[in-house]
Amino acid sequence: DWTPGNVIADQVAAIKAQIGTSRVICALSGGVDSAVAAALVQRAVGDQLTCVHVDHGLMRAGEVEQIENDFVASTGVRLIVRDEKERFLTALAGVSDPETKRKIIGREFIRVFEDAQRDIVAEAGEHGEDVKFLVQGTLYPDVVESGGGEGAANIKSHHNVGGLPDDLDFDLVEPLRTLFKDEVRAVGRELGVPEEIVSRQPFPGPGLGIRIVGEITAERLEILRRADAIAREELTKAGLDNEIWQCPVVLLADVRSVGVQGDGRTYGHPIVLRPVSSEDAMTADWTRLPYDVLSTISTRITNEVREVNRVVLDVTSKPPGTIEWE
Ligand code: XMP
């Protein structure tokens, strides 16, 4: 019988057998897959697992706290958070080209993770322990897509921050290899992973960095974070989270338009709402959100985020538009 409880029991036994008394590390992105994979491994081998979250400063409002507080409290995972916001901002300074942004974010991520990993290996070594394993949240569709061979986890690494280089000297632990996304969610719930993480919609590894059209700065990230939080709050309040695949909120940082707010003329930035419906993100249609919800989001963003004086709706399907703007 397929039940989340049975999957957990089987995987816990398999993970124990694979890992033995060795130590194991896991990169936690804040997404569903790495969180559930980590929770399973923690259930099996407890503190032999150390998780690392690289805080690149490109997450949405509340997400790092969700990992740092809620995820740790509910799973007991031992977590190291590397605050690398300044490092990423410095590396990204002056860069507007989307592919260059992605490359820089991916490269810095790997460097930081390797630093953290070296620290963990050194600390374990002092206790005569061996760090041999790396957890990956590979799902069944990823395995199939890559032909099911070794290195399946790396197939999307160009598309995935958290995609680690394949020359890492670790054996992989992939407890979700036989599962589909909805099964992973069921297992996560059974393990007590917080609902905000379990039901999270897709969010790109490079985060808000590819939702600012133009250069990434701390101020622009803050503007986008506030607008995004309002849009997410209103979509949830309207009960629309299950209707949409995801709704990127994009800041057109290099575009300005004239507006009037209060008694004065403004020259602010537009925010784009990009609600999409999709089965697998390969193709998508724009979601016909109710006008009153769009209206509330628009009014709130322009009232509450001073730098934004216009909210626009993206009504493009994929293709020709991609879901993300960069
Ligand atoms: P596009 O923009 O290509 O996005 O239509 C398709 C889906 O992939 C997500 N996405 C990413 N996910 N790392 C990820 O983990 C990335 O670099 C990345 N870029 C896009 C996007 O949010 C959508 O769900």
Image (cartoon, rainbow, N blue to C red):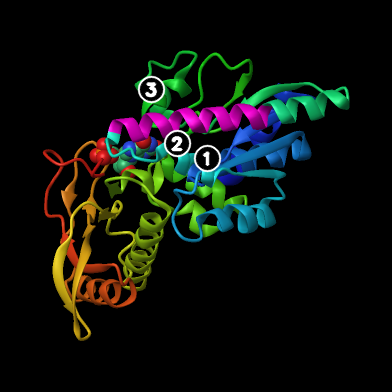
User: In the rendered structure, which disc, 2 or 3, sits on the residue that comes first in sequence?
Assistant: 2
Label disc, if present, on residue 87 of the rendered structure? 1
Using the image, tell me which numbered label, if any, was put on residue 22.
Answer: none
Residue 311: which quarter of the image?
A: bottom left
Three-letter amino acid code at the position of disc 2:
Ala
Image side of residue 234 versus residue 75, left or right: left
- Numbered tag placed on residue 144 in the rendering: 3
Q: Residues within 10 Å of mark 3 (few under 14, many from 20)?
A: few
* Circles 2 and 1: CB atoms closer than 8 Å: yes
Q: Secondary structure at mark 3?
A: helix
Residue 65 x, y percent position in the rendering:
58, 58
67 left or right of 238?
right
Residue visible at 55% across and 46% down?
A: 187
Under mark 1, the amino acid is Arg
Q: Residue at x 52, y 33 (%)?
A: 137
Q: Is residue 268 visible?
A: yes
**Vertical arrangement, residue 191 with respect to residue 117, above or below:** below
Graded by Cα atoms within 10 Å as few (under 14), some (14 to 19) or many (20 or more), the crowding at tag 2 reads some
> Foreground mark, 2 or 3?
2
Q: Where 283 sits versus 303, above or below? A: above
Q: Which residues are magenta?
A: 99-117
Q: Which quadrant holds the C terminus?
A: top left
Confirm or deny contact between disc 2 and disc 3 (CB under 8 A).
Answer: no
